[in-house]
Amino acid sequence: MNLFECEAIFEGEPADVWKVWTDVARWPEWDVSKEIARLDGPFQPGVSGWAKQRGNLGGAFTITAVDDGRRWVTECPMPLGKVIFDHVLEPVAEGRVRVVKKVEVQGALGSLLLLIAPKMRRDIAQSLANLGRRCPHGKPRARPSEIGGPRETG
């Protein structure tokens, strides 16, 4: 079930944005939901990490796909399923990039995530804007927009 996706467009070079976005240990510097984050190896498929959400327990994640400089996917296990985060980076104009984070849930308890999806969406939208400010030349040109909303497929 696709929960939602958020995007932001801001000034920056793709290589610079990729470097900041994939520096897991520094996520808490710009991601409003992260208190601690670590990766237990190089940024590549099959490597696991751990992140603690502010005010919540921490949880493991695994990188499942990397298209260097363009896209990466992580999966977070949950009881009877998993949450999938798909991160996309693309140039949109000279010196500007578009970043997108898509959230999907698979499994029996997926519909329960609909209860927290609005807060997740707000946090991700704010974090993508912060990512833009964190990157060299990162001045958001457009407010992060939320695309879609909670929806069920089936």
Image: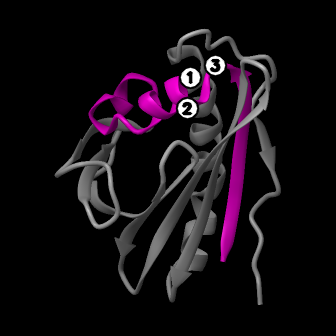
Q: Residue furthest left?
A: 40
What's the residue type where badge 2 is placed?
A: Ser
The quadrant of the rendering that contains the N terminus is bottom right
Circles 3 and 2 in contact, beta carbons < 8 Å: no
125 in relation to 51, above or below: above
68 in relation to 102, above or below: above
Instruction: Label 3: state its secondary structure.
Output: loop
Q: Which residues are magenta?
A: 1-30
Q: Is residue 62 left or right of residue 42?
A: right
What's the residue type where badge 3 is placed?
A: Gly
Instruction: Label 1: state its secondary structure.
Output: helix
Which of the labelled discs sits on residue 140, or is there none?
none
Q: Position of residue 63 (x, y in %)?
A: 36, 61
- Is residue 75 one of those drawn in magenta? no
Report the colour scheme. one colour
Q: Which residue is mark 3?
A: 12
Packing grade of label 3 (10 A; few <14, some 14-19, many >=20) is many
Q: Position of residue 22 (x, y in %)?
A: 40, 39
Earlier in the chain: of badge 1 and badge 3, it is: 3
126 in relation to 135, above or below: below
Packing grade of label 1 (10 A; few <14, some 14-19, many >=20) is many
Which residue lies at the image location 60% right of the left edge and 47% below the top edge? 119
Circles 1 and 2 in contact, beta carbons < 8 Å: yes
Q: Is residue 132 left or right of residue 84?
A: right
Q: Which residue is mark 1?
A: 130
- Is residue 6 one of those drawn in magenta? yes
Circles 1 and 3 in contact, beta carbons < 8 Å: no
Q: Which residue is mark 2?
A: 127
Closer to viewer: mark 3 or mark 2: 3
Closer to viewer: mark 1 or mark 3: 3
